[in-house]
Image (spheres, helix red, strand yellow):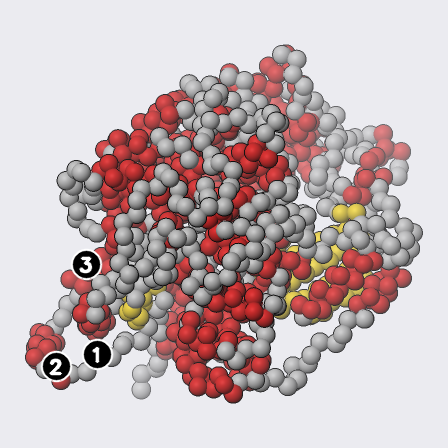
Amino acid sequence: MNPPSSSASRSKQARLKPETYLPFEDLVRRLYLEENKTTQDMAEILERKMGTTVTNSQVIHLVNKVWSLRKRLTPSDHKFIDHVKRKRQDEGKPDTRIKLCGVVQDEERLARKKTRVHEPTFQKFVKAQNSMMAPNMGSPMNPPGLEVGTPTPRPISEFSPMAFARSPQNNSPPFYFTINHLYEGLPSLKLEIVFQRITTKLQGAPTPVPFSPGSLLSMSKTPALLSIPGTSSQDLNMSLIVDQEGTFSDQELLEVLQPLVVQSGNRASDPSSLRSALDDFTGSNISSRYYTTLQSFFNNATPIIDDFAVQTFYSAARTGNINLLRFFIDLGILKGRKGRWSAHSQVIGVTALQFSIEYRQGPSISLLLRNDIDINTQPVSDLSQSVLKTAVEVQNLELVNQLLDMGAEDIVFEEIYELSPVRQRYLEELKGVGLTWTRNVLRTEGKLRQTILTALFSAISLEDDDIFEAVLRNRSTREKDGKPPIPFDSLSHIFFMRLWGSPYFLQGDEARASMRLESLLECNSLHIDINGIGLCGSTALMLAGGIEGDVAGDSEEDENEGPTEDKYGDTENIIAELLIKYGATNKSPPLKQLETPPHMSHSTQLIDTSVSLIQLYAILDRLHDLIPSFPWVSYHQSLEPLSHLNMKIGIKILSISARFFEVKLTISFDNTVSRDILKSMEAVSGSLESSVYFDSLFKCTSKITFNFYSGDASIDTLNWGDFTRVEPLGLLQPHESAHPGGQQILSVLLGIPKAPEAGDHIQIDIKYLHWTRQNAKLEACKQAIEFYTTSIPNMAPAELAAFLALAIRCNLHQRIRDATRYLQKLDKISALEATWNGDNTTFDLILDIAKHTSDPGVSLELLTLIAIHIGHTYKVIRLLDQGNVDASYVLEGGKTFLETAAVLGRLDITQVLLNAGASHRLLEAKAKAEKIGHFAISHIINEHIKRLEPDKDMTTPSDLPTPGPAVASNAPPTDMPTPVPIAPESPRDPIVHEYGLYMSSDGLQEMLSSGSYWFPN
């Protein structure tokens, strides 16, 4: 008998338990279907994630047997697709969307693959026989994992195009303004007018029409217009333009370009997706071939076009499109006085220069430098560093010398002593497009666990000796010119020592390293503090001798003599000898004065438990009552929008000493939401911006650590970490021990009611409905709805609420109406679900129900905050109009809706809020928009300030035309062309007409249901 093969024996011994692999279904799907990882790569990733051995055969078993994941279509699949398409065409439904295992398939790509599918002769014979018997044959069976149906539709209403969006179910008048008031001057509406004018001019010319503009704008053809971060999908419209140059007309170019402009202006996708789409556009020769059309477009001075011009200018700098750069320069984008971009021309110019340097576009760099750019201005790119530092990191010696000759300063715009997630992600993006210089930066910062601060530090860490010497010489030149020393220079030798020992640093060449260190020590312009202490708490000599953290001894010899020859004299430690030569000693008195670092002290655990959301609110509220300056009060605002989801919360409070405390909060969701939602909502709209966030093993978990202290503490002690001072009122006194304080904290927490036990009575169908809503696929959710529909009249209130929330998740409008007929009160889960995932009709229904029941279970202000975060202008308008939400409402963190919209880059929502009367913290919102580079938003806020204070001279002049004072009016804008009558059988909601696909709530629903919200860090 032959022995079993090794692979067979491995498969027998390696049966994973369901509880082990089920939590990783989403990860496996993403790796296999979206990232096209091999099963061997997947096995290695799962092994790291699961903490146990995972073999290739186990992964194959999971993919093929457990979850039946497929990436290729079979002949039977193509047969079913053809059948459904024919049936839909007979029914007058030309567009069809095809999904395989949840992934939308490109029809053109499928058509090419279909021609390559081999069909045996016998199968052809059977197919021919079946076609003759077709009238008597049933429909082919739907293969598992294949979905063929209607693409995401545009929502419609029964109103004419000029009657601004209103719910057919809502006939009540608005509370204090008309809805036309909210739409007045909206940037995307002005964009629509611009496109209509240009299109009208082009309609007289005969142009070839190789494909329908309507199909270009359908969701089945343009899924990437609502691009999902983290996927490998490309912007299909841009691909069509770039790949089929010469086959489309000017009008079709505008049809394709318009949604991208709206999406870019409202930051509807993550920055990398928008950059990729724009770079495809500017990297082609379209700008030269369609120069007149683009000139007609960009000559229109409206905020959204101005914003798109800036983004396109940046893209041209990245792709090296000299002609397009010249076009925008001639248009005045760098003009410092009396221009459309005059208030921000210097920032725009230096940011474009930064991109050109990053992408090594020499001609673009030369062109920009010839246009009087202030090279010492802070760019608004994700690197957020000086162009001199970028030139050093790119290792462009000629450019470094040129910038230094032009007066470039080694400026640190922001001191960051940890790894910046935004910067790290951007460097990874640059690395992904083939910019190899980023590898050295990523490697060095990964070793240091912090961001490199100065250009000199970058020069120290890199291989190029010439660049290092050039930057060092410039330090001497600065001193001769009477310029003050740069503060970070005095600890350059400590930065060097932190790199020393890495095998990558100067390729381990000790001779080169010693020469570089000696150059630093010889440069008097650096003002080296040879015995200075770095942030790590060590001197350079300690780092060289491997005695980091030691302090000077008590003997007289230790205090008065340097290290002995016996200790440092071996040839392998010439670095230490060099430091001693320039005055380094063991004597470090400042270390004696430092208290023991809090993180090295013994800690006392005050509490470590799992709590419900209600309990967490109570804990934080009670702590806030005792300590008014306790900073976590705004977590109520950040957690409540996610309370419709299943979340597990753990809280741990440690007392490190009599005055220092550490609080760790762990928040875990099911595999339906990203931890980035909570982080962004707190950072953008809350108050706890200084939290330290740690990514955990699972993508759906956030770990937040916050340190605070009470009483008096020395400055030296506080240098050990990030601590926020919290003055207690009866909680702890300055000289009180940790234990009494701990008892007082525990006494506060003991007043919290006991959480329900797992065995408490709850209806199983309610659990099932909530689990289905949060975890199941959309088709499974719909099946559950249909299964329970007949029981609606007999449902208990809790069951009806769970059913309604699931119907909202599916956007089943009739089932929502059926359930609400028996509903006594709307709960917050339904209101939150409708705001996060509901389409326009669903949201209108729930908002009307909330009006009649007078209590949606959650504040309308919180729903408005959610709508701003997801970028849904329609819902914001409805809440301001129907819900009478105050546009100047102040959030818990002291911020406003307007500040949130400005930071997130929601251009249209910003205009809506201003039209609705937002007037609080306008200057703060304007400043935040400018800091991030949202100049169009800054402009419209500034114009609003001018209208509110006409006599006050503002410091940011602009010649941009702006909408006049908002006046309630039912008349259409005078400059809008007469609309083409629309047939009664195909009405269109005007908000969808004006916004195109971007404002399609169903399209937005598709993006949100994928769990791919985009929020900035």
Q: Residue, x 89% and y 37% (percent of image)?
A: 555
Q: CA distance from mark 1 to mark 3?
A: 23 Å
Question: Is disc 2 placed on a helix, strand or loop?
Answer: helix
Query: Reading the chain from its start, which is encountered first: label 2 or label 3?
Result: 3
Q: Is residue 337 visible?
A: yes
Label pair 1/3, CB-CB below 8 angstroms: no
Task: Say which residue label 2 marks.
Answer: 135
Q: Is residue 421 visible?
A: no
Give the foreground label among 1 and 2: 2
Question: Residue 441's spot in the image, x, y percent?
Answer: 51, 39
Q: Is residue 50 above or below residue 791?
A: above
Q: Alpha-carbon neighbours of circle 2 within 10 Å: few (<14), some, or many (≥20)?
A: few
Question: Is disc 1 placed on a helix, strand or loop?
Answer: loop
Residue 628 or 588: which is nearer the viewer? 628
- In the picture, measured across the screen, residue 152 lies left or right of residue 459, that is left
Badge number at residue 140? 1
Q: Residue, x 86% and y 48% (percent of image)?
A: 711
Q: Alpha-carbon neighbours of circle 3 within 10 Å: few (<14), some, or many (≥20)?
A: few
Viewport quadrant of the N terminus: bottom left
Q: Residue, x 83% and y 50% (percent of image)?
A: 727
Question: Residue 782's spot in the image, x, y percent?
Answer: 41, 76
Q: Label 3 is placed on what type of residue?
A: Arg
Question: Residue 390's spot in the image, x, y percent?
Answer: 50, 31
Task: Say which residue label 3 marks.
Answer: 112
Question: Residue 685's spot in the image, x, y percent?
Answer: 61, 50
